[in-house]
Amino acid sequence: MTSSQRRDHAIFDADLPGKAMTFADLGRILSWAKPHQKLAATSLTLVLIASFIAILLPVIISRVVIDGLLIQQPNSALPDLGLIGLTQFLSELMDLSALSVACLLYGFLTIACHGAYHLHRVSLAKTVMYALRDLRQDLFHHIEYRPSTFFDKVAVGRIMTRVTNDVQALFEMLMGVGMLVGEFVPFFIALALMLAIDAELTLYLLTALPVFAALTYIFRMATRKVYREIRNSVSQLNQNLQENLSGIQVVQLSNRESVNYALYKSVNQENQRQEIKAVKLETSYGAFMDNMVNMALAAILWVGGGEVVQQAISLGSLILFTQFVDMFIRPIRVLGQQYNTIFRAMASAERIFQALDWDEQLKEPNAPAALPARLDGEITFRNLTFGYEPEMPVLEDINLTIRAGEKIAIVGPTGSGKSTIIRLLARAYDFSDGRIFIDGIDLNTIPSTDVRRRVGVVMQDFHIFEGSVLDNIRLGSPNISRAEAIQAARWVNAETFIMALPQGFDTLLNERGQNLSQGQRQLLAFARVLASNPEILILDEATASVDTETEQQIQSALATLTEGRTSILIAHRLQTIQEADRIVVLKHGRIREVGTHDELMSLGGIYFTLTQLQFQDLRSIQ
């Protein structure tokens, strides 16, 4: 993948054109099964055993029972795989009639055959599930480490489809391929026996195989586009569903249910239309193959029946021949039936490999800088220019030094670049035009994971994970003890409401923390960041969505929270801004004013105007 393709995120979302699956693609899929090769070998051994037994069953009926016992005209020139001699030996040994022994032998082999097939399917399913479990984990791990630029431009529903539906399609394909082995082993054994029974009739039948194969290929090529369209429509369904459910509150508050239902219905109907088309093609193919098999059997009975009348072959041999015809043709039929699954899997494999090969990532330093045990927290922005799209800069020529332990507030109109500054400081995006230093160390020489351990960010949009309150504070970090997490909650005045919950810190939270208020979730966000004890603290509109009482609780803790830390506050509320040591005013991506509240008010510039507008809003509310 070229660098230009890496940044063309529309390619990731686009419907893929599809291609034939190559041996390289199949080998890549099977590489996830390599750690489980012992289980796969067990499955292969079992299917070979079951396939050989499946050959013996019709031989018992035709050669042992019909020719040897009922008609009593066994032809030693024709193969019986030693079963006639085995039946006679067991009859004498057990003092039973040969017919009784043949029936018992047939029953025993039937149980053994189905038992081996069952164990084969179970071991095959385990092998495939273990392999795809590893694949899904690798895919999830790979996607987790894509940078923010990737998730800014790629629909979440498309990603979900790759991890769920597309991996499931591979499961169906690999199971089908594994089961085909059990069909082709009897195929070659049956072919050898058929040649021994009647070589001329077998050669006639062999000439029909290319016709079957060609017709199957033509028929399946016609279905290829249908299955690709099905995968695309399923992906669109997932994307539409994810967008609607994640924004359900907006949907309901805007009375948009009927509009969203109509959109979902349209996508769903397209999926239904493609699925019905696929069903029609599948049923037509099944009927076609059934008719072809029956016609082949009719031809064999016509020709073979004449040979029986002329005593060229025995009746049992003819019956054995007809039974082998099913084993002879069934692999082609099953392969045709698996075409549906294979083509679904082709599109799915393309999507999965595309995601796995998407190597867009943050540029990590080749020679990482060594950080001290504790940073002072001085931050310097030098000639920094940045745009999410290169031709559209969001920040231009930013020059600013934030002293260690200083509390800075960044204000400005919407779109002025306030949040962009802290995203760059947290190494969410790469930048090359300008530099950022922490304690004199170039930020681009520090690994992103190290930066995020030293820079704590509290966002306005706080995400609650599945688990307890304590889990959401610690986030699984082994470096944060229970006592430290509780202490962090106490510092931000969150302990009071947490202890009022049914199980306190061990209370399980609902999806997205719906059993907490917005203010409580925000206090939990403060506790989460403080528990990790970062040297630099960033509050990005962290008090914008809380009520006045909750904000007062947060404000009372800010002095303690920011003590000994460099703090950057992005906020609109005047109380938060006034307590800052300095205020930086941004407009159109440039620093326009820097100073204390009183200094900026005396200037009568941008900050003065923003403050007056906020006072007007407060007066209008009162």
Image (cartoon, helix red, strand yellow):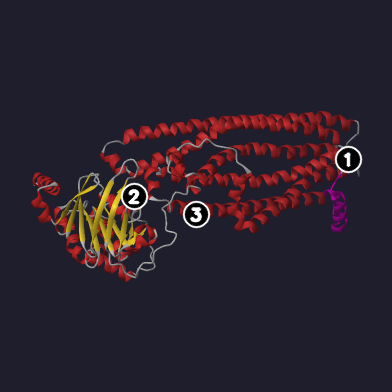
- Say whether residue 26 is left or right of residue 114: left
Q: Nearer the viewer, mark 3 or mark 2?
A: 2
Q: Nearer the viewer, residue 448 or 92?
A: 448
Amino acid type of the residue tagged 3 in the rendering: Gln
Give the numbered dot on residue 137: 3
Query: Which circle marks residue 433 in the picture?
Result: 2
Q: CA–CA distance between discs 1 and 2?
A: 94 Å
Please report the bounds of the magenta region as a residue range.
79-99
- Residue 454, x across and y down, in percent: 32, 63
* Residue 237 falls within the magenta-colored stretch: no
Q: Which residue has dot 1 on it?
A: 71
Crowd band around label 2 with a 10 angstrom C-alpha radius: few (<14), some (14–19), many (20+): few
Is residue 17 depicted above or below 402 in this figure? above
Residue 404 location, quadrant? bottom left
Looking at the rendered structure, the secondary structure element under dot 1 is loop
Question: For the point 32% across and 43% down, which residue is it?
Answer: 247
- Of callouts 1 and 2, which one flags the residue occurring earlier in the amino acid sequence? 1
Disc 1 versus disc 2: nearer the observer: 2
Find out whether the residues at labels 3 and 2 contact each other: C-beta distance under 8 Å: no
Q: Is residue 40 left or right of residue 419?
A: right
**Label 1, residues with CA under 10 Å away: few <14, some 14-19, many ≥20:** few
Q: Is 91 covered by the magenta stretch?
A: yes
Which quarter of the figure has residue 173?
Answer: top right
